Amino acid sequence: FEVEEAGDAGEGAEEEEGLLVRFVTTLQRRKVSTLEQLSAEFGLKTADLVARLRSLEAMGYVTGVVDDRGKFIFISRDELQAVSSYIRRKGRVRISTLAQESNRLIDLSSHEAEPEADEEEEGGEGAAKEPAAGGVSS
């Protein structure tokens, strides 16, 4: 009796699931992520990354938008609900008014633990932070 190859078929699936969880968690914590940064971090071409984001949105794992500057902005279900409630309450709304209200209702600050805290003290205030004013534009 001889075994030529051995392996665990479930191991690849577990690793892929772990990567998916890490990917979704990264989006949720960062709130605003550049497509280039995500592509490099997860070893994907930008076009494949965008396809994966759309697929995850269709499956309900993430919600958000890709803006015209190449950034994915994660928007939580609660934030979407708040914007939806605002529109229902106001009825007809100008896009500029909706943009202002969305900037107020949608939190764009990162929720990651910030290991760069030492760098910020050395490099000045906000040296490694994403600007929060990038929200929805009109």
Image (cartoon, rainbow, N blue to C red):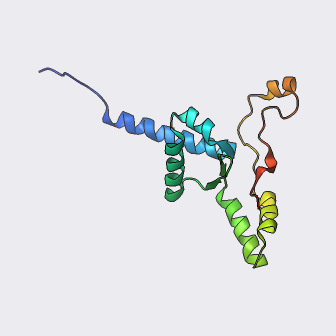
Q: Position of residue 18 (x, y in %)?
A: 49, 38
The residue sitting at the left extreme is: 1
Task: Classify residue 35 by image quadrant.
Answer: top right
Q: Position of residue 45 (x, y in %)?
A: 51, 38
Q: Where is residue 134 in the image (x, y as percent from the top left)?
A: 77, 50
User: Which quadrant, please, contains the C terminus?
Assistant: bottom right
User: Which quadrant, please, contains the N terminus?
Assistant: top left
User: Relative to 8, does residue 98 appear above or below in the rendering?
Assistant: below
User: Relative to 39, does residue 63 appear above or below in the rendering?
Assistant: below
Task: Classify residue 90 by image quadrant.
Answer: bottom right
**Left/right of residue 95 with respect to residue 25 in the rendered view:** right
In this rendering, the count of numbered labels is 0
Q: Position of residue 105 (x, y in %)?
A: 78, 60
Residue at screen point 42% across, 38% down:
14
**Left/right of residue 44 with respect to residue 119 in the rendered view:** left
**Front in this rendered view, residue 23 or 36:** 36
**Front in this rendered view, residue 19 or 50:** 50
**Front in this rendered view, residue 4 or 34:** 34
The residue sitting at the bottom extreme is: 91
Residue at screen point 75% across, 79% down:
91
Residue at screen point 66% across, 56% down:
76
**Left/right of residue 81 with respect to residue 8 in the rendered view:** right
Residue at screen point 46% across, 41% down:
17
User: Relative to 104, does residue 24 appear above or below in the rendering?
Assistant: above
